[in-house]
């Protein structure tokens, strides 16, 4: 009796192993496909190569050099000083109360929807680690590497956004990089990542 595995059985085993490896990785397909979401080798959208969008080389987008875009220097865009942009005081920008901004109630805000519009979130090593969905012109919804809802962004008056966790705690801010993307800073003003429009990658696919 021939007990050697057939070619079809070997192929099935390979496919099963690949699927298991992908599942073990834990990151959803939307962030796994580096051939489509490749910022590391894109000199236009990677701040490492494009000094115009790098706050360490362009002082106009560096909150440590430009006080008007730094919430720690400009109280008008700091939610700790301006209650109108603080979701703990302003219910219209708080997804707990404004259900149109809450992805648990508004399924169209999910990045798993093929028609989603927004940005990919990259760390400073240009690795995709999250997604940001446009809710409307003033609000963005943030999803982590597992595409789980993890927070939101609300517009300030300087072309940027403040970043809040789901509990409404201020954890950082976005600064427009002038090229249809944003740099992401923590609430101390340290640069921790960048956002690039999803359309940049979708157009390539």
Image: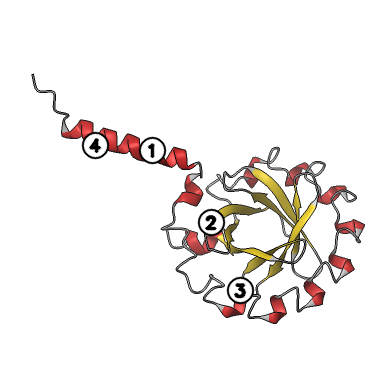
Q: Is residue 194 left or right of residue 40?
A: right
Q: Position of residue 140 (x, y in %)?
A: 70, 55
Spatial CA span between label 3 and label 2:
19 Å
Q: Nearer the viewer, mark 3 or mark 2?
A: 2
Distance from Cα at disc 1 to Cα at disc 3 = 37 Å
- Between disc 3 and disc 4, the foreground one is 4
How many other residues sit within 10 Å of disc 1, few (<14), some (14-19) or many (≥20)? few
Q: Are marks 1 and 2 in contact (CB under 8 Å)?
A: no
Q: In this figure, which residue is indicated by the disc labeled 1?
A: 19
Q: Where, quadrant-wise, is the N terminus in this rendering?
A: top left
**Residues packed near mark 2 inside 10 Å, few (<14), some (14 to 19) or many (20 plus):** many
Q: Which of marks 1 and 4 precedes in the sequence?
A: 4
- Judging from the image, what secondary structure is the residue with disc 2 in? strand
Give the class, few, some or many, for how many residues have Cα within 10 Å of label 4's Cα (few <14, many ≥20).
few
Query: Does dot 3 land on a helix, a strand or a loop?
Result: loop
* Residue positioned 72% across, 51% down in the render: 152
What residue does disc 3 label? 179
Query: Could you tell me how far apart the alpha carbons at marks 4 and 1 are, in whole angstroms?
Result: 12 Å
> Circles 1 and 3: CB distance less than 8 Å?
no
Q: Position of residue 84 (x, y in %)?
A: 90, 57
Mark 3 and mark 2 lie on one chain; the one further toward the N terminus is 2
Which numbered circle lies on residue 205?
none
Q: Which residue is mark 4?
A: 11
């Amino acid at each position: 009796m021939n007990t050697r595995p057939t070619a079809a059985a070997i192929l099935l085993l390979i496919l099963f192993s690949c699927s298991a490896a992908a599942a073990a990785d834990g990151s959803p397909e939307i962030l796994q496909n580096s051939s489509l979401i490749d910022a590391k080798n894109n000199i236009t959208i990677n701040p490492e190569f494009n000094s115009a969008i790098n706050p360490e080389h362009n002082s106009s987008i560096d909150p440590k050099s430009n006080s008007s875009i730094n919430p720690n220097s400009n109280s008008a865009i700091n939610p700790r000083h301006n209650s109108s942009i603080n979701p703990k005081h302003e219910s219209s920008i708080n997804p707990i109360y404004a259900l149109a901004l809450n992805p648990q109630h508004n399924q169209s805000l999910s990045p798993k929807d093929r028609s989603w519009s927004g940005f990919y979130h990259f760390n400073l090593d240009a690795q995709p680690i999250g997604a940001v969905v446009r809710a409307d012109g003033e609000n963005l919804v943030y999803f982590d590497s597992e595409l789980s809802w993890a927070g939101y962004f609300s517009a300030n008056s300087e072309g940027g956004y403040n970043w809040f966790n789901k509990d409404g705690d201020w954890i950082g801010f976005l600064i427009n990089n002038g090229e249809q993307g944003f740099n992401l800073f923590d609430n101390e003003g340290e640069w921790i990542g960048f956002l690039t429009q999803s359309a940049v990658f979708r157009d390539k696919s």
